[in-house]
Amino acid sequence: MKRRVVVTGLGALTPLGNSAQESWESAIAGKSGVGPITKFDCTSFNTKIAAEIKNFDPLQFVDKKEVRRYDDFILYALAAAEMAMADAALTVSPEISTRTGVIIGSAIGGLATMEHEKEVLLKSGPRKISPFAIPAILPNLASGLVSIRFGAKGPINCAVTACAAGTSAIGDAYKTIAHGDADIIITGGTEAAITSLGVGAFNSMRALSQRNSEPQKASRPFDKDRDGFVIGEGSGIIILEELSVALERGARIYAELVGYGCTSDAFHLAAPPPGHEGAARSMLAALNDAGLSATDIDYINAHGTSTPLNDLYETQAVKTLFKEHAYKLLISSTKSMTGHMLGATGGVEAMFAVKALAEGVIPPTINLDNPGPECDLDYVANTAREQEINTAMSSTFGFGGVNAVLIFKKFHDK
Amino acid sequence: MTLEEKVIKLVMEQLDVTRDECVLEASFIDDLGADSLDLVELIMEMEEVFNLEIEDDELEKIRTIKDVVDFLKFKGVK
């Protein structure tokens, strides 16, 4: 029999708040985390807005030396992991250290460090490149430094599946525990790519919203006037535990992670295909893994990026798989508030899905004033909805054709 | 500020250690918690501040704060 995996801790740093709870409260209040870019001089850029982390003091979590050396994507993960461990009331004792792992995803890793060190190289020559440049750039160093911080000596990995990275990481963590290779895994995603190169390059792809005059209205998934995604940043970390281990230590159980599905489009380097059958197949794979039927799903935290293609094709994929039930289930995109946190998004949205289950409140899709053509599902427009649910799906899709889907379920002890 | 004080101030900033820990005989690795990368970074900062170049074979001989001070004096830094 498959080992059961439960969620026992939540930690997050998002454009909506500097903790999971604050982010959740802002989300169900329908607040937007988007504003003018402050991280670099964006005067000459087509896009001048982003969903940045606000008033984050890394010194609450790490020392001065670490702040100077680590890229923000690592600092965000360390902070979110610290909060998730505290929330789970978990310390990694020597007895459990080799059974405790870390799998944190990131799409890009230390982009700001890469840009900075290239400037140093051009300006002052190769001798002046920091000896900490490589460790600050490598995407797996978020996992590495979190494992050092907590003494987690079990399986370690890093998903680098673009905008699905956080979800891939959690899916892999779930399978690793279910398979018996670890009992506890610190998992999720982290990203800090609001940099000149990050924004400039996404702009070149025509992927970002340019609604610079109305930042808080720029991320509008499923709305007919959506014009691209808003880049966000942050980290979402959850603690996964094997059920008997969690019960034995008397952990608070938020929800059970019951299914993971992953597929590839094998279609295009960035765009999803019309109908997005790969997305539908990943949802089906997650349902099969969970032993659930399509009609069992109550809520989908959608990928819902606010790009013209994604939101239409994702809607089509949901209709293909769920048929008439597609019109009964609730679906919302919290990216309408957090922006698109790339590799962090899977971690943060898993946290929102778990909170929706635990609290009986569905976060809204804000800025949904006039649904786009064919976008005719119940997207929980503009205001949160109080509704008890038993299952929540979290979908994320990434460049390279990655489709990754998790299913969480209300925890019952049998 | 004496040369010793300048070096100690730099060490305190780079390695995030206290003034009390920075006795002249303190070993960067054994007493001040530095690793080999910390040491490279510290030396790069010294190069910047004192405007000189320190070769890798010279770096290998530097183990304590006093080694740095002696080395800088040898290079004619006041």
Image: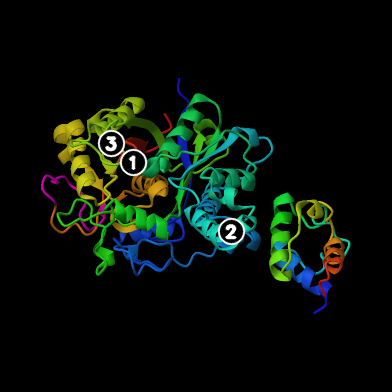
Residue A356, given in percent of the width and then of the height, sits at 34, 48
Give the amino acid at mark 2. Answer: Phe
User: What distance separates the C-alpha of mark 3 from that of mark 2?
Assistant: 40 Å
Q: Quadrant of the C terminus of chain B?
A: bottom right
Give the amino acid at mark 1. Answer: Phe
User: What distance separates the C-alpha of mark 3 from that of mark 1?
Assistant: 8 Å
Does dot 2 land on a helix, a strand or a loop? Answer: loop
Residue A373 in the magenta stretch? The answer is yes
From the image, state whether disc 3 or disc 1 is nearer to you. 3
Residue A311 in the magenta stretch? The answer is no
Determine contact: label 3, label 1, CB under 8 Å: no
Residue extending furthest toward the top: A1
- Residue range corresponding to the magenta coloring: A372-385
Residue A85, given in percent of the width and then of the height, sits at 55, 48
Instruction: Give the answer, above or below, for where A152 lies relative to A87.
Output: above
User: Mark 3 = which residue?
Assistant: A268
Does dot 1 land on a helix, a strand or a loop? Answer: loop
Chain at numbered mark 1:
A
User: Mark 1 = which residue?
Assistant: A399
Horizontal relation, residue A198 to residue B37: left or right: left
10 Å crowding of disc 2: few (<14), some (14-19), many (20+): some
Please tell me in which quadrant of the rendered image residue A234 appears: bottom left
In-front residue for pair A408/A321: A321
Residue found at x 75% / y 64%: B17
User: Mark 2 = which residue?
Assistant: A61
